[in-house]
Image: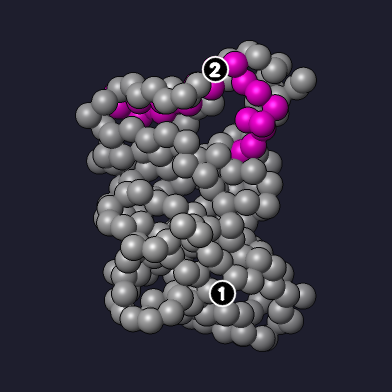
């Protein structure tokens, strides 16, 4: 669901560990999903995307998993680095070109 | 390729004034989208435009807000008679067609 003025959930990991960030989406008709990274004071930056006809997609150090049965999306970051510290948003494409964003998760990487 | 350019980066307006936010899409992109972000929240869709056309404005407040994307020049998001609740970060994105969004760095509007 969407956050309503609440503080963002925070995931704190040790540098070098793997991170898993989760997202639930609401519309079973959504056919395209994207993960974005947003650093303080900046716009969202594309990380990886996946279409609904896939259940897994890998990039460089990142993997996105899609479970359509339970409408769940996850982002896995391998060997997390301090530069990965940011807020991560999932977004779904419901209709036309409009994206609907989730509430975000703050990732903090401890050196 | 300069990316999506938004200006100004920061804008301060007194209550009742007008705010104009500009967005120049990436070269070759004909689709522009505006989103609003409140602190600690995700981005909320406002409006989707193509050159000289508003395609979807379902996220735009019915009053005081308007957007345009003229044949020449940047897209403009205009907020008339601003109120404190309009304070937010406003992000523009562009794409060549479906998907392939690229976001700008945003304009942070503060209403005092």
**Residue A78 percent location from the top left of the image:** 54, 17
Residue B7, can we see it? Answer: yes
Q: In the depicted view, which residue is nearer to us: A100 or B97?
A: B97
Which residue lies at the image location 62% right of the left edge and 84% below the top edge? B18
Q: Is residue B38 above or below residue B70?
A: above
Q: Is residue B16 above or below residue A8?
A: below
The residue stretch that appears in magenta: A64-87
Q: Secondary structure at mark 2?
A: loop
Residue at the top extreme? A17
Residue B13: image location, x then y, percent: 71, 79
**Residue B41, above or below B96:** above
Q: Count the marks: how many?
A: 2
Numbered disc 1: what chain? Answer: B
Q: Residue at x 31, y 70 (%)?
A: B50
Q: Mark 1 sits on what residue?
A: B21
Residue, far left: A53
Q: Quadrant of residue A31?
A: top left
Compared with A84, A19 (above or below) is: above
**Residue assigned mark 2:** A78
């Amino acid at each position: 669901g969407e956050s309503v003025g609440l503080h963002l959930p925070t995931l704190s990991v040790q540098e070098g560990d793997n991170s898993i960030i989760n997202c639930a989406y609401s519309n079973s008709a959504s056919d395209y999903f994207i993960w974005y990274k947003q650093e303080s004071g900046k716009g969202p930056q594309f990380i990886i995307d996946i279409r609904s006809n896939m259940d897994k997609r890998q990039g460089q150090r990142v993997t996105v998993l899609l479970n359509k049965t339970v409408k769940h999306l996850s982002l896995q970051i391998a060997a997390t680095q301090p530069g990965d510290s940011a807020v991560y948003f999932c977004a779904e494409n419901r209709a036309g070109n409009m994206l609907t964003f989730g509430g975000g998760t703050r990732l903090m990487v401890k050196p | 390729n300069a990316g999506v350019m938004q200006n100004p980066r920061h804008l301060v307006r007194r209550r009742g004034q007008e705010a104009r936010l500009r967005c120049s899409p990436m070269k070759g992109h004909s689709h522009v989208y505006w989103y609003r972000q409140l602190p600690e929240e995700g981005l909320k869709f406002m409006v989707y435009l193509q050159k000289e056309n508003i395609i979807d404005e379902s996220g735009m407040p019915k009053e005081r807000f308007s957007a345009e994307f003229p044949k020449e020049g940047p897209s403009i998001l205009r907020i008339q008679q601003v109120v404190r609740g309009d304070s937010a970060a406003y992000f523009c994105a562009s794409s060549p067609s479906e998907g392939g969004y690229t976001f700008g760095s945003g304009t942070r509007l503060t209403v005092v």
